[in-house]
Image (tube, rainbow, N blue to C red):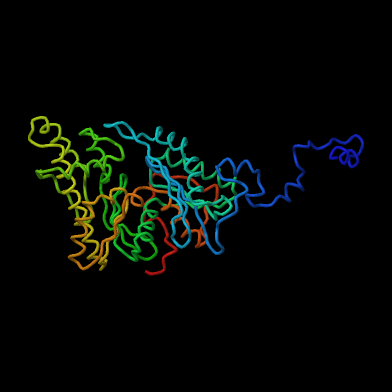
């Protein structure tokens, strides 16, 4: 029938348009919804193209992508703060080794689409139900960041969804606020790449104190490699468990400089003690893990308390991967209670890098009208917490 119509409407001698290439008019008539696009694009993500949408009227949904370090995660969050799904996978290396950018990025590329499928399946949603896609712009490791950003750009074009770039640190803060119900706490942000004491003022998360060399998580991870601890599930977690068996406190360098801390010296000292004294039986690995934790965490409690005094704040929120350390939470809670305040802490579900924190922070910005143009969906390894204009908070 098409051939007959074409024969009737094509003048003699004129070239016929190839049948596989629709006319410009027909292309313009295509609807913009994802359901109007090839069914293979939706089915390829593991979502049935015939499933009924489960998004309720008036809700805004965001999918967040996190891949700044050795964890790659995808989360879906609703505008009222409800987390619908939050799967993730971790790139784990052999004991005594760290994770390199190229190998970490390759891991993320191999597993990220499977995590997208899991997130949609767990939430019971279709791509059409999403309102925006959020990704970690930085800070973090360059290659892993880019590997995830490329996926977000691809899905944005397939699903025709806007993109929102998110600061990784702000994602941790907003996740802690919504999960714990904290309103305006002083924030201790401790992870493998960052150590900061933060408080909100005049539309920015201001950094009052930070490390002047290496981050807490990096310090703990490197010492774990020194004594041969496993990277599964994480070196910091294994140090925490081994520290519980420590019976002897080894005095270590305590370096607080004003509102900042220095951790490279205590790491060098702990490594030297391990190399020279463990074999002689003078100390055990457990003793050194215990002493390292106690000293570093005391330093963090001190600069956090100074920030509380400066800001006239009573509450503290701990975020970041190291923030799920129970001993750190215990020490901080003792100080906070003495000041008549409250400590807000989380477990590994939300302290450790996850997609939901990026989804929620991006969703807050999206509801304020912020969208990142495709040409600006880049990544940066250095992206300060106080670089972000926090338009969604109106309290200060």
Q: Indicate left or right for 127 with 231 as reference.
A: right
Q: Quadrant of residue 205?
A: bottom left
Q: Nearer the viewer, residue 16 or 293?
A: 293
Q: Nearer the viewer, residue 367 or 4?
A: 4
Q: Quadrant of residue 53?
A: bottom right
Above or below 176: residue 90:
above
Q: Residue 127's x, y, as percent?
A: 56, 50
**What residue lies at 31% left-to-right and 34% top-to-bottom?**
98
Q: Residue at x 24, y 61 (%)?
A: 307
Relative horizontal placement of residue 27, taking residue 364 as reference (left or right):
right
Total numbered badges shown on the rendered structure: 0
Q: Position of residue 183 (x, y in %)?
A: 34, 66
The C terminus - image quarter: bottom left
Q: Position of residue 37 (x, y in %)?
A: 65, 46
Residue 278 appears at what percent x and percent y?
12, 33
**From the viewer's perspective, is residue 288 above or below residue 306?**
above
Residue at position x 30%, y 53% in the image = 189
Q: Quadrant of the N terminus?
A: top right
Is 165 left or right of 14, judged from the image as shown?
Answer: left
Of residues 215 and 375, which is closer to you in this image? 215
């Amino acid at each position: 029938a098409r051939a007959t119509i074409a024969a009737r409407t094509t003048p003699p001698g004129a070239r016929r348009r190839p049948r596989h290439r629709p006319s410009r008019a027909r292309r313009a008539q295509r609807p913009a919804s994802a359901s109007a696009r090839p069914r293979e694009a939706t089915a390829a993500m593991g979502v049935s193209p015939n499933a009924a949408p489960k998004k309720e009227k008036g809700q805004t949904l965001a999918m967040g992508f996190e891949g700044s370090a050795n964890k790659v995660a995808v989360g879906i969050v609703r505008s009222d703060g409800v987390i619908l799904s939050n799967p993730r996978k971790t790139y784990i290396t052999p004991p005594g080794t760290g994770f390199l950018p190229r190998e970490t990025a390759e891991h993320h590329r191999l597993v990220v689409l499977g995590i997208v499928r899991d997130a949609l399946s767990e939430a019971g949603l279709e791509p059409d139900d999403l309102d925006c896609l959020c990704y970690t712009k930085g800070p973090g490791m360059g290659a892993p960041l880019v590997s995830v950003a490329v996926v977000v750009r691809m899905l944005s074009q397939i699903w025709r969804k806007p993109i929102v770039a998110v600061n990784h640190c702000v994602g941790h803060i907003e996740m802690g606020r919504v999960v714990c119900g904290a309103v305006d706490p002083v924030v201790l942000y401790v992870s493998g790449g960052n150590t900061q004491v933060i408080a909100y003022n005049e539309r920015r998360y201001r950094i009052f104190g930070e490390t002047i060399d290496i981050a807490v998580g990096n310090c703990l991870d490197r010492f774990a490699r020194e004594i041969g601890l496993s990277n599964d599930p994480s070196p910091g977690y294994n140090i925490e468990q081994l520290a519980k068996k420590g019976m002897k406190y080894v005095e270590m360098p305590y370096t607080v400089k004003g509102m900042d801390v220095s951790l490279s010296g205590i790491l060098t000292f702990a490594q030297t003690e391990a190399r020279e004294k463990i074999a002689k039986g003078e100390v055990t690995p457990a003793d050194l893990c215990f002493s390292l934790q106690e000293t570093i965490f005391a330093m963090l409690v001190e600069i956090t308390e100074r920030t509380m005094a400066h800001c006239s704040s009573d509450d503290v929120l701990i975020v970041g991967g190291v923030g799920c350390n129970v001993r750190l939470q215990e020490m901080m809670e003792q100080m906070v209670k003495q000041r008549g305040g409250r400590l807000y802490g989380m477990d590994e579900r939300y302290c450790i890098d996850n997609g939901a924190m990026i989804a929620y922070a991006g969703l807050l910005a999206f509801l304020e009208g912020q969208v990142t143009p495709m040409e600006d969906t880049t990544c940066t390894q250095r992206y300060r917490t106080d670089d972000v204009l926090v338009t969604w908070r109106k309290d200060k």
